[in-house]
Structures are given as C-alpha cells and as structure tokens.
Image: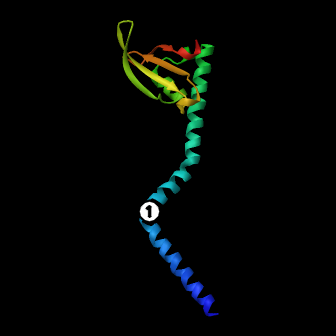
C-alpha cells in the first residue's frame, strides 16, 4: 500500500514537473495548433486559385480571353495575379501581370497579361502553351 502511494506521489510530481517544462514553449505549441487549424483554409485557397487559373488557360486556348477587355474584367473572372510589374511592349510602357498555379512546382505553366495605361488588355503571352 505504501508503495502504491509512493508511486502515485512520484507520478503526480513528475507530471507537474513536465507541465512546468512545457510552459515556456506554450506559444510555439499554440502556433503549431493554429497552423494545423488553418490547413483546411489553405487547401481551399489553393484549390480556388488553381481553378481560376485553369479557367484562364481554357479562355486563352479557346480565344475566349478576347471577351475580357480590361484588367478589372480579368480580375473579376480569374482573380488577382501573382504579381505585376511595368514592362516595355512595342515601344510603350505596359503593366505586365503574371498568372500561374498557386503552388509553383505543380506546373511550369504561366500566363502574362499586358495592360495599357488605361487598364485595357493589350495582349497576352503564354509561353508554356506554345
């Protein structure tokens, strides 16, 4: 009986000690928990971006991209680009925007859309489509 009580006391003190050792790392553990909770949202975001990029590829292959005259039209239909920069095209300064899959390693496919100073879609380039 005394042995059982001694084991119980040792177990309780060891578990309390272990909890005290974990306390300084609680913020790190909570970050990992939040990251795990956000996984579902991350998967939904990637699926959304990839789906819109697939729609853009179809529009380019079918010629349907010509329906979208402005940057606003393109962003409403296909979402925002990965990034935009200024470039020279046919002697004019244009806004060049890159679209691709959310996870770059998924595919080398890229689409560049070029807009004039008024936001009008001037042209596109899809080097990976040939």
> At numbered mark 1, what does the secondary structure look like: helix, strand or loop?
helix
Which residue in the structure is indicated by mark 1?
Answer: 25
Lateral position of residue 64 relative to residue 82, left or right: right
The percent position of residue 43, horizontal first and vertical second, equals 59, 42
Q: How many marks overall?
A: 1
Quarter of the figure with the N terminus = bottom right
**Residue closest to the far right:** 1
* Closest to the observer, 72 or 101: 101
- Quarter residue 26 falls in: bottom left
**Residue that sits furthest to the top in the current view:** 90
Residue visible at 45% across and 69% down in the picture: 21
Residue 15: image location, x then y, percent:
53, 76
Look at the image and name its color scheme: rainbow
107 in relation to 25, above or below: above
At 61% across and 93% down in the image, what residue appears?
2
Quick check: 121 left or right of 117?
A: right
x and y, in percent, of residue 71 in the image = 45, 22
Q: Is residue 108 above or below residue 44?
A: above
Q: Is residue 28 left or right of residue 39?
A: left
Q: Is residue 42 above or below residue 34?
A: above
The 10 Å Cα crowd at callout 1, few under 14, some 14 to 19, many 20 or more, is few
Residue 121, given in percent of the width and then of the height, sits at 46, 16
Compare residues 14 and 129 and report the one nearer the observer.
14
Q: Residue at x 43, y 27 (%)?
A: 83
Identify the residue shown where x is 47% and y is 18%. 113
The one of 66 and 42 positioned closer to us in this rendering: 42
Say if 25 sits above or below 20 in the image: above
Drawn side of residue 53 relative to residue 21, left or right = right
Q: Nearer the viewer, residue 46 or 120?
A: 46
């Amino acid at each position: 009986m005394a042995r059982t009580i001694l084991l119980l006391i040792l177990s309780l003190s060891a578990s309390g000690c272990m909890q005290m050792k974990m306390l300084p790392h609680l913020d790190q553990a909570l970050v990992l928990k939040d990251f795990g909770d956000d996984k579902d949202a991350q998967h939904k975001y990637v699926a959304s971006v990839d789906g819109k990029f697939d729609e853009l590829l179809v529009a380019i292959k079918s010629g349907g991209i010509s329906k979208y005259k402005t940057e606003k039209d393109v962003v409403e239909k296909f979402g925002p680009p990965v990034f935009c920069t200024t470039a020279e095209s046919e002697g004019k300064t244009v806004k060049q925007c890159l679209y691709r899959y959310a996870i770059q390693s998924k595919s080398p496919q890229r689409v560049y859309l070029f807009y004039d100073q008024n936001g009008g879609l001037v042209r596109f380039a899809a080097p990976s489509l040939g």
